[in-house]
Image (spheres, rainbow, N blue to C red):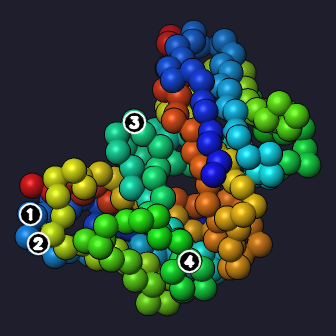
Amino acid sequence: GENVEQHPSTLSVQEGDSAVIKCTYSDSASNYFPWYKQELGKRPQLIIDIRSNVGEKKDQRIAVTLNKTAKHFSLHITETQPEDSAVYFCAARPPSFILTGGGNKLTFGTGTQLKVEL
Amino acid sequence: DTEVTQTPKHLVMGMTNKKSLKCEQHMGHRAMYWYKQKAKKPPELMFVYSYEKLSINESVPSRFSPECPNSSLLNLHLHALQPEDSALYLCASSQEQGFEQFFGPGTRLTVL
């Protein structure tokens, strides 16, 4: 099955700096890669996602890049702010787990605790 | 309504109790999920329902029993749980032709 590795497990940056989190996946057929942000005690929230037919996607201060050849994708946060402090999870979706009705199975990375210091 | 809701927010139960978690969405999504999440770990998939039918069971112990009474509701019935089952239980849903999974706020379960 799919396996997703995520690095680093913790990341501390100064406010205003950039943060980069990297994930690698094992199933070359995986075609959807979301990133979730989870604040303490809250639900995971999708912040950005990318599909396998796209190499890069940007939404304001957040961007995701995908390298299908190397089977890795990265989250880039620029001009970090204290409210960016949270745990970030990457995920990959292999097509073998896409069901009728839209059900699908995500394989999550182990998470990165991002701390933005003043 | 663009949210997944879950009740209760917190639940404390003994190992001999029977309780249920409830999840509701009114976004017309036809796939619904139960996840278990331990502190600082990623969500761990338990069950997936598609069109109100159980499609994926990730070898979850029988003390967890899911139910999908209709396309908007998802229940998780709990019986004879163990202290190690204490966790945040998240519900999620996704649309028929979509990719994104929308998560509910979760139920914080403590088993004494």
Q: Amino acid at mark 2?
A: Asn
**Which is more N-terminal, label 3 or label 2?**
2
Q: How many marks?
A: 4
Tell me if mark 4 has few (under 14), some (14-19) or many (20+) residues whose alpha carbon lies within 10 angstroms of its own: some
For disc 1, the chain is B
Marks 3 and 1: in contact by CB < 8 Å?
no
**Disc 4 versus disc 1: nearer the observer:** 4
Callout 1, which amino acid? Gly
Q: Looking at the image, tell me whether mark 1 or mark 3 is earlier in sequence order.
A: 1
Instruction: Out of A43 and B69, give the one closest to the viewer.
Output: B69
Is label 2 in contact with label 1 (beta carbons under 8 Å)? yes
User: Disc 4 vs disc 1: Cβ atoms closer than 8 Å?
Assistant: no
The answer as to whether the residues below labels 4 and 3 share one chain is: yes
User: Label 1: which residue?
Assistant: B14
Q: Secondary structure at mark 3?
A: loop
Amino acid bearing label 3: Lys
Q: Position of residue A74 (x, y in %)?
A: 73, 30
- For disc 2, the marked residue is B17
Residue B81 lies, in percent from the top left, at: 18, 64
Q: Which residue is mark 3?
A: B40
Host chain of mark 4: B
- Residue linked to disc 4: B55
Could you tell whether B107 is left or right of A39 in the image? left
Q: Earlier in the sequence, mark 4 or mark 1?
A: 1
Q: Are marks 4 and 3 in contact (CB under 8 Å)?
A: no
Image quarter hosting the N terminus of chain B = bottom right
Judge the density around disc 2: few (<14), some (14-19), many (≥20) Cα neighbours within 10 Å.
Answer: few
